[in-house]
Amino acid sequence: MNLGENEGIVTEIERYAIYDGPGIRTVVFLKGCNLRCAWCANPETQNLYPEMGFFVNKCIGCLKCIEACPYDALKYEDGKFITDRNICMEKCYHNERELSCVAACPGDARVQYGKIMTVEEILEEVLKDKSVYDRTGGGVTLSGGEPFFQKEFMFKLLKALRANRVRVAIETSGFTDWENINMILDDLDFIYYDIKSADPVLHRKFTGGSNDLVLENVIKVSEYAKKNGLPIIYRIPVIPNFNDSKEEIEKITKFIKNELYRKDYVELLSYHTLGLGKYESLERDYSLTKEKITKEKIKMLKEVVSEAGLKVL
Amino acid sequence: MPGEYHFGLNTKPERTERIEKLIDYVNSIEPGICLERGRYITQVYKENEYESIVMKRAKSLEKILENMSIYIMPGSLFVGNQASKPRWAPLFPEYEVKWYEEEIINGDPMYPWERPADAFQIENKKESLKEAQEIFNWWKGKTHRQKVYNNLPEEFAIVQDKVSVLNIWDYIQGGVGHFSPGHRWLIKNGLNTVIEIAEEKLESLGFSSSEELKKREFYKSVILSCKAVINFARRYAELARNMARQETDDERRQELLRIAETCEHVPANPARSFYEALQFMYFIHLVVQIEDSGQGISVGRFDQILWDYYKNDLDNEILTRDEALELIENFFVMIYTINKIKSWDCTDYFRGSPMFQNLTIGGQDPVTQDDATNELTYLVLEATANTRLTQPSVTARFHKKSPEEYKLAVAKVIRLGTGFPAVFNDELYIPALINRGYEINDAYDYCIIGCAEAGPAGLLAGRTGGAWLNLPKILELTLYNGKDPLTGIRLRKNKNDKDLSEFISFEELLDVFYDQLDYYLKMEVAFENIIDYTYEQGILEPFSSIAACPETSLERGKTLREGGGKYDFTGQQTIGIANVANSLYAIKKLVFDDKVLTGAQLLHAISTDFSDKTTDPSGPEINKLCESVDKYGNDVDEVDFLARDVLRFVSSELPKYKNTRYKRGPIGCTMHASTTTVSSNVAFGKSVGAMPDGRRKGKPLADGQSPMRGTDVKGPTAAVNSVSKLNNILLSCGSLYNLKFNPKDLRSGPVLKGREELSQAKFAE
């Protein structure tokens, strides 16, 4: 995709976010991620290009999308829609700023994941709630995907937000070069940092990436946070058969306790399958279990963290 | 005690034994119809046919208060009852017997005791129905309703009864109500002072003009009704003493004796304590709802009116905080016992038998403009959480300097999910009132009356409620060149004689829509004035007049209907602004900007309720198209500004029209607009066909100035932004926005604070 100098790809801008930092916030979800976590609840945020999602239950059967596709990627046969996603990928996703099939859909059955936006366009949207941020101690949270995946764009956006006196938080996997993180720490008011596993093999198996970089970076981030009074919450997504055992959580806890400088809060995020519909809309397979983690188990794991002397959310 | 938890919130209210028993007692009684008032007023009217209107009313009040059954609820520290049992509804046959007869006698469309909701029982059915029939027979042809219809041009009746452009049945079938008594003045002076003033006035009046003679009648009726109220209180004193004599429990005996002493003293004399002040207030609050069937009698600024009494009692150690809390809760239960039966038709607009007995806390001092919250403010919030009754309607005033502690306490009660308190914004309401001519101190002293209407207690006459105006219906008529698709009735063609299939531009559509709107607004104004004129011909209330505006009505010798208030406005309720803005914008976008549809296609689609599958695009496709256009409530200027402009038209046109008290004494005397809804959006929705906003035929409309349900998809901050783009300051009769949250999101400390901050956020702008 040829993006303009000042452009990035945004999956969503969510206003009135109350679980992504202090106060009332707007979360800007930047598209693209360098990890492929098996449990990812937002698969539509992973690729750095627009994609088409199809919600068959909302389809009214007008077939306008088929007429509209210039590449004949869509077919309707025997009462079923068939999408040649290879054609979409080759012809469309990297060339079309607005997907023709989505534009033609009179309902909301076809959606475009990923909108090309300029910094100014994002700014216009998020500043609508500036008075709310100011009153509630809120601001903007940069999330993803992985916000560092579009780092140049993200840096520009961050600077623009700071220039408009908006407080900024970030939600990151930490899977990026240290200098990228170091570059923006001064401009942040709050960090959510994922620590998914302390085990390198498991980490690579479930996320597609090594945890070396993640752990090296978090040590430095925590040192900065301690020195500069930057609030930081370490987030552990609790995933079945990956890290939902006492031993795995103990390992992470031990790492936080022994290696990190600042260790205010650890947040355990319980595994959920709310993203399944999105997998279906992208016609992608979901490899993990559909069973939830029990409340008792989460409670037990939280105790593991708190028994180590860490504050747990 | 571990209570029942709902999303982490304790759902079990904390109550003292007394309050728990009282609430159980009241709730154990099914609402019913009480004939007593109907019986006595009919007797008085029969015997006094040639008396003046005010004297007929005063004599009726005297007769009713002297003869109606009275009772004291077990354990209650306060007395006063509206009908023979708690939550039973008295009959007001002077207003209307047509629906009484249809429903109570003939069961058309159903008997009140067979209603699926808001049902009313009747005791001793055979005898009661016989007596009821006799009462109804006498009133036929003499009722307020009959007189309204005599005064109403035929096409007006069609607009309401057939096409549902507006609905003002509440004031055709019942009284005005909608005021907040001057409790502060009354409690301080006592009814004996009112009688003295009236006697002095009577003394000084001559017999030389019809005006003087009329005033004499007024003062005589005031004296008679005040004496009747004092005697009513004495009946309770006597009853309490008799009960005390038979009471075996020593504590209860003392309580009954205290009730007796109190009722011998108030409301004749000024209250001397917090307890007496509450009993005084309740008598006034109650009697105006026996004299007249008008609802929306507001208690006013409870924490301000009673603060001196509370503080004094605390200083003198004759009252503790806990005792005061229990008294307030007991007072709430008393208010909860008051009820009214409406016709089944009218019930559609007022589901859940709401009485709109509003009680206001917080806000600012009228003189210093400092924050006015005090300990009583918090006691009211506690009482609200503990009683969790549907009445009183508790209202919290917020302003820029409201303390954090107060706002959080309010938010905590809101999250219990009882719908109370409603939050009102001083920063908006006070300038809105000043813009209508209120003096600054009076504007700062406003309380909420009825649903969401602002006005100072003791000073405002007129009525804050009026016709429901069905805005989407007016747009629908415009789209069909003035013809109602449901009934086929065409009241008035568009001025260019075109329908949606023929408009050549969006501007043309807007132009004819505003022309139709203007026509129906004029008609609404005429409706309002005809009704007020009719009240003046038959129903003038001496006691309500001195209760509502003691100082001005006594000084001028006039009832409220004749200009007895310091201020006087006629309100109304504008419904469905979201549907209108969304429909207009959908037409603009689909037909004129993007040209995806022709006007003819869209008109066909809505006239067939989006169900015609033979067209291209098909009805369901057009429905999807309509739904996918941006909607009001998502912070999208283009559509939000349409809502703003249409609502501004309504709210700036109405005040150009005078009401029937113009130049008769009060300040104001114009119409003005509100967006309060109750359940009229559901009732009106039944008469509006499918609309270009994608809403299907017969479905409910949007409430208040809230976005249409399910269409505000960008979260509450975006929705609040949209709502605040409206020129809310022009809605001096009240603006209503329902913001609904998932209880889960109000659970924890910081989040609750966030939600509370959000309701505050708009104040900064």
Image: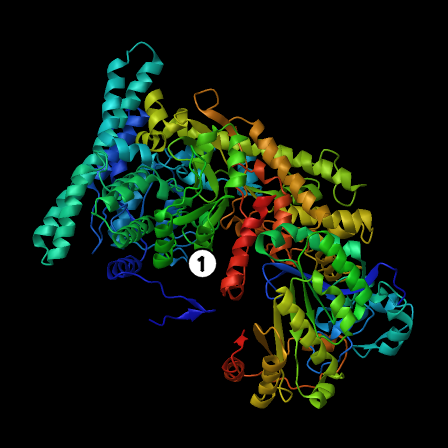
Residue closest to the eye, B727 or A61 = B727
Give residue B202's position: percent from left, percent from top. Answer: 26, 18
- Image quadrant assignment for residue B290: top left
- Image quadrant assignment for residue B622: bottom right
- Image quadrant assignment for residue B156: top right
Q: Residue flagged by tag 1: what amino acid is it?
A: Lys
Instruction: Give the image's coloring scheme.
Output: rainbow
Residue wearing tag 1 = B412
Q: Chain of mark 1?
A: B
Q: Residue at x 18, y 41 (%)?
A: B263
In the displayed structure, A145 sits above or below B371; it is below
In the displayed structure, B439 sits above or below A41; it is above
Give residue A129's position: percent from left, percent from top. Answer: 65, 53
**Which of the image's four quarters has the C terminus of chain B?**
top right
Q: Residue at x 36, y 25 (%)?
A: B552
Q: Residue at x 54, y 57 (%)?
A: B755
Give residue B471's position: percent from left, percent from top. Answer: 61, 43
Furthest-left residue in this view: B245
Residue closest to the eye, A85 or B527 = A85
Helix, strand or loop for disc 1: helix
Give residue B390's position: percent from left, percent from top. Answer: 39, 54
Q: Is residue A105 visible?
A: no
Q: Answer left or right for B157 relative to B277.
A: right
